[in-house]
Amino acid sequence: MGWIYLILAGSFEVVGVMGMNKVAKHHNLQSYLFLIIGFIFSFSFLSLAMKTLPMGMSYAVWTGIGTVGGTLVGMFFYGESKDWKRILFILMILSAVIGLKITS
């Protein structure tokens, strides 16, 4: 169950980052709620995951999911660069996360 919580935590971190982008563009209540709710759920699920998974690994996977997710959202929804180098480094982050899962 810890891994499910960790994946949910990372996914909600992406929601929180999307909320940060919304706040930067539109200073309205909906944008702030998107940001706050995303991070509340992210930290809540991270806390639940860390009850059964090691802290260092949980944090690394959580930030990896957030980094990859935030980058992909930027590429597909906000017109950020889809350069092959960015994709290569995303794959490197994913391989590190998978490596942590295999070794835990």
Image (cartoon, grey):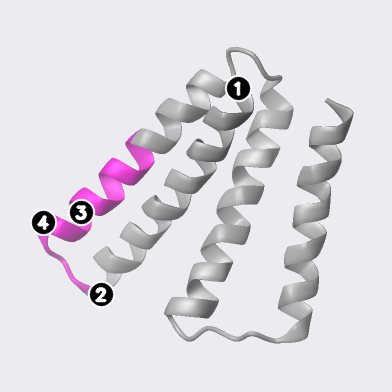
What percent of the width, then of the height, locates residue 23?
25, 64
Q: At label 4, which amino acid type do we have?
A: Leu
The x, y position of residue 78, in whole percent, is 43, 80
Quick one: label 3 or label 1, which is nearer the N terminus? 1
The residue tagged 1 is 2
Q: Which mark is residue 35?
A: none
Residue at the spot of label 4: 29
Asked if residue 55 is among those painted magenta in the image, a careful observer would answer no
Residues at marks 1 and 4 touching, judged by CB atoms closer than 8 Å:
no
Q: Quadrant of residue 68?
A: bottom right
Residue at the far left in the pictured view? 29
66 relative to 70, above or below: above
Q: Sequence order check: which comes first, mark 1 or mark 2?
A: 1
Q: Residue furthest top?
A: 51
Q: Residue at x 54, y 78 (%)?
A: 75
**Which secondary structure lies at badge 1?**
helix
Residue 3: percent from left, percent from top: 63, 29
Check disc 3 and report the residue beneath it. Answer: 32
Is 27 included in the stretch rendered in magenta?
yes
- The residue type indicated by label 1 comes to Gly
- Which secondary structure type mostly characterizes the magenta part of the structure? helix
The amino acid type of the residue labelled 3 equals Tyr
- How crowded is the residue under tag 4: few (<14 C-alpha within 10 Å), some, or many (20+)? few
- Secondary structure, mark 2, is helix
